[in-house]
Amino acid sequence: MKVAIDASPLNSGHSVRGIGSYTQKLIENLKTVPGIELIQFDNGHIPSADVTHYPYFDLFFHTLPVAKKQKRIVTIHDVIPLIFPNRFPSGIKGYISLFFQKRGLKNTDFVICDSKTSKNDISDKLSIPKERIEVIYLAASESFKKIDDVKRLKSVKRKLKLPQNFALYVGDVNWNKNLENLINSIKISKVPLVMVGAALVDNKVPQTQALERLIKRLNLEDKIVKTGFVEEEDLVSIYNLAGVTILPSFYEGFGLPVLESMACGTPVVCSSNSSLAEIAGNLARFCDPQNPADIAKKTLRVLNMSKKAKESLSRKLTAHASTFSWQKTAKQTINVYKKVLG
């Protein structure tokens, strides 16, 4: 089977975000499957193939051709801007792009998404029949695991100037990430917070500017470390060093940091809304994203667990994360290709 896949996320700003990670891991694992001939393209010229796969879908930029040359599949990770339109204004250009993107979807054979939550949202907001949408879960990279190499952990801690017994946030600065309430919870819990993500140190981004003002207003400069983007190897070490990972989002299409943290045996505090409860199962400590005091309470509850309870939970977390794999993601994606080709 000859598959053409749009690899443009690997050569854009998406390369350090979830879409870039998804594209990279999917390509790597599809290449290992016998019988699959993978052709990457990123210049708009679609090579001849049995099926074309667009591994991302931008709501407000015209990235999907209206007409199609051959069978095609699109991965839509979430439609959060359509669920909260007041928080993600599209503007006139965005509105026009969305019109053409919807036209392109009408000429798409199948849609892949990351969660049952996203499937319902995509069907509702983009008028796609549910029978044309397949849920295929993402996974943490195989690099994410428990580390016993004390020397490696100490080296990363020293290099990034990480505090003792800290809480961890990994992600972007979008409104749905709920960073204002996260920061307010740190004021209450007094737990040091390490924040990882390229956008968190990009002072050209209005949300980053607002975050900086809030940190200064609450006098939390000494409590918060922002690393910016870090390579995957260091990120694995950071998860291992953390006492807890916090993802108090208002909404997520998947929530990959939940699985990455669990794969490293590190407990998770997250919201129970959208896809987060679906991905975390019953192993996260769920918090009220609207209530900083509750986020703080759940954070401290995890950090104050006994050594025995932490070890028991850690084993359960790694076992749960191991049920998700990129090999499984690739296999299920190929099954969608076969379904489309009949």
Image: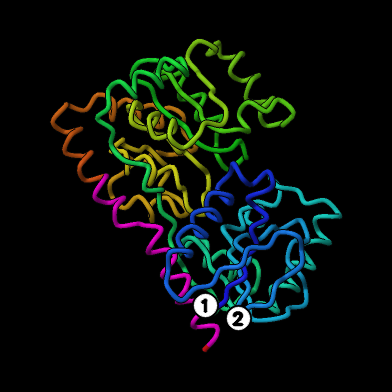
Which amino acid type is shown beneath numbered disc 2?
Asp
At 42% from the left edge and 50% from the top edge, which residue is drawn? 276
Q: Is residue 1 left or right of residue 271?
A: right
Whether pointer 2 and pointer 1 mark residues with C-beta atoms closer than 8 Å, the reply is yes
Q: Disc 2 on helix, strand or loop? A: loop
Q: CA distance from mark 2 to mark 1?
A: 9 Å
Q: Which residues are magenta?
A: 318-341
Q: Which residue is mark 1?
A: 337
At 37% from the left edge and 37% from the top edge, which residue is drawn? 269
Q: Main secondary structure of the magenta part?
A: helix
Tag 1 or tag 2, which sits nearer the N-term? Answer: 2
At 37% from the left edge and 43% from the top edge, which residue is drawn? 143
Q: Picture coordinates of residue 340 (x, y %)?
A: 55, 83
Number of numbered discs visible in the structure rendering? 2
Q: Picture coordinates of residue 309 (x, y %)?
A: 16, 33
Q: Toward which corner of the image does residue 315 lie, by quadrant?
A: top left
At 61% from the left edge and 35% from the top edge, which residue is drawn? 173
Placement of 307 over or under 25, stated as above or below: above
What crowding class fits label 1: few (fewer than 14 Cα within 10 Å), some (14-19), or many (20 or more)? many
Most distant residue in the right direction: 92
Q: Which residue is mark 2?
A: 50
